[in-house]
Amino acid sequence: MGVGVWLVGARGSVATTAVAGAAALRAGLAPPAGCVTESPAFQGAGLPPLGELVFGGHDVVATPLPKRAEELVRGGVVPAPLLEAVRADLEAADAEIRPGLGGWDGGARSRRADVARLVADIAGFRERHGLDRVVVINVASTEPPCARQPEHGDLAALERAMDEPGAGPLPPSSLYAYAALSAGCGYVDFTPSAGARLPALDELARTRGLPYAGSDAKTGETLVKTALAPMFADRALEVRSWSGTNLLGGGDGATLADPAARRSKTASKDRALREILGGPVEGETHIDHVQAMGEWKTAWDHVVFEGFLGARMTLQFTWQGCDSALAAPLVLDLARLVARAHEAGESGALPALAFFFKDPVGTDEHRVSAQYDLLHTWVHGLGGTQ
């Protein structure tokens, strides 16, 4: 019995920190800082205990989780004394990691066989551990924006296309989502990649009675934006410009050095301001990769706003944080919440989980306080067996 957490990108920094952190919490070696679902407001909501989470996943790299955790110790993410205490848990999770999707080799086969392998990997994991349900969470590298194709809009058309020779109409993130839903699992888009956010995959989720959530987890600068922007709107202070610069190290920074992948991220980051402030605002979010920063990131924002009688004023803030340490507890929260939604019979997009995302599916609500209220009301109102 228990809940499986199947991580796409299972040997990355976020996944490794999540596995190590869950083991530390289970052993009472660390407080649940950053875990929203461990706060008093969520007690009695029928969420699966953190101690019942079992980890596995897919990845295209071979570095074992204990070695990856050693790198995170050197980077100041995982405390050195903790590593040996959770090594067995890292080894157990690593034993459940299977090869992910590689690049398309141009062969004549269809992608159906690749999806079947992914489904079999997830199903085998569920059976070996006797799990009640599995939640698949994509924490892999951000993809470039996905060019929409006719097959994305209709499940029957997508199913036909999946049997045709060639690379097929789905990007890798959507292939993982398709496999997760085909395996009977809830799904989470932790990144801005297309994932389950295609009408055909929404149809598949609803047909199968499965929930999904996303997208692009809100861990730093955008979290602050969605707290501050409503303040300006509620006080009738007109924001004239909002510009930001992000400096990132680590794998995420390296990925976002690619202009195409960076477009996915900046589009997601900028959408909240437009929704909260009621229209476009001058200024852009810039992202730069600084390798020397390692697992850390810095965001600097400059806001110009107008007050009474047209007086121009500014606000500036700097956010410095460790991306993996900010993201990992959200992975645990989302695994518990989506598992609970699945148990309660929820299907399709879960707008109540907007609190966790920059670009939430199923809702245009971006104000973080309103999102929190929605989450709290929703989780305590779920039915089903607890």
Image: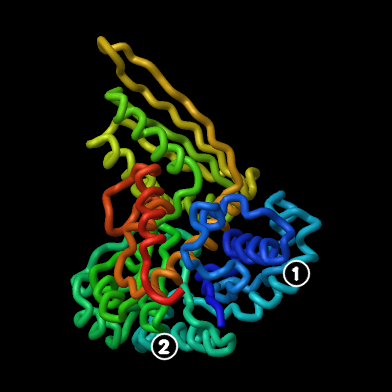
In this rendering, would 95 be left or right of 34?
Answer: right
Which residue is rendered at x = 54% and y = 62% of the image? 332
In this rendering, would 357 be left or right of 86?
Answer: left
In this rendering, would 83 be left or right of 37?
Answer: right
Which residue is rendered at x = 27% and y = 54% of the image? 363
Which residue is rendered at x = 48% and y = 87% of the image? 123
Callout 1 crowding tier (Cα within 10 Å): few <14, some 14–19, many ≥20: some
* Image location (x, y in percent) of residue 268: 36, 49
Q: Residue furthest front?
A: 44
Tag 1 near tag 2, CB within 8 Å: no
Above or below 245: residue 252: below
* Image location (x, y in percent) of residue 155: 22, 78
Q: Mark 1 against mark 2, which lies toward the viewer?
A: 1
Q: Amino acid at mark 2?
A: Ala
* Image location (x, y in percent) of residue 22: 63, 64
Residue 141 or 66: which is nearer the viewer?
66
Q: Amino acid at mark 1?
A: Arg
What is the spatial separation of the Cα atoms under label 1 and label 2, in whole angstroms? 32 Å
Is residue 356 visible to the viewer in this orientation of the structure?
A: yes
Q: Which mark is residue 317?
A: none
Helix, strand or loop at label 1? It is: helix
Is residue 144 visible to the viewer in this orientation of the structure?
A: no
* Image location (x, y in percent) of residue 139: 50, 63
Q: Which mark is residue 116?
A: 2
Which residue is rendered at x = 36% and y = 62% of the image? 381
- Residue placed under numbered mark 1 in the picture: 87
